[in-house]
Image (cartoon, helix red, strand yellow):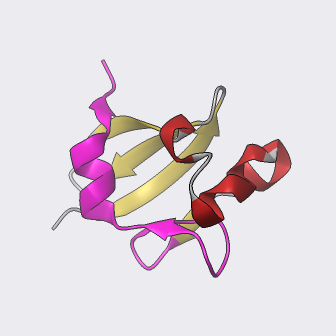
Amino acid sequence: MKKIISVEPLNDYRVLLTFSNNEKRIKDMKPYLNIGVFKKLKNKTFFNSVHISFDTISWDDEIDICAETLYETSIPLD
């Protein structure tokens, strides 16, 4: 399983992810912004607080997405 080793918030509710194989991918979080706890991500300051937690990304104790899902639903950075 690939782990996330770096995350950087980008404009337009996207994050740049670097995986343990050094592959960089971009995940668009806009589709999540009206779903449950993910609504909190609409706050740009909160969105920009994204960090690595247990080999994946997290925003607080309630919001995280598993690394495998992030890998499968993100697009490679050209």
In the rendered image, which quarter contains the C terminus? Answer: top left
Q: Position of residue 11 (x, y in %)?
A: 66, 27
In the image, residue 17 lies in the stretch drawn in magenta: no
In the rendered image, is residue 34 in sight?
yes
Q: Position of residue 58 (x, y in %)?
A: 56, 67
Residue most extreme to the top: 78
In the rendered image, which quarter contains the N terminus? Answer: bottom left
In the rendered image, is residue 22 in sight?
no
Residue most extreme to the left: 1
Nearest the camera: 37 or 11? 37
Q: Compared with residue 26, is residue 69 higher up or lower down, i.e. above or below?
A: below
Q: Position of residue 46 (x, y in %)?
A: 79, 55
Q: Report the number of numbered marks.
A: 0
Q: Where is residue 37, by image quadrant?
A: bottom right
Indicate left or right for 11 with 16 as reference. Answer: right
Q: Where is residue 69, by image quadrant?
A: bottom left
Q: Residue at x 58, y 70 (%)?
A: 63
Nearest the camera: 72 or 16? 72
Q: Which residues are magenta?
A: 53-78
In the image, residue 77 lies in the stretch drawn in magenta: yes
Q: Residue at x 69, y 51 (%)?
A: 41
Q: Residue at x 68, y 54 (%)?
A: 39
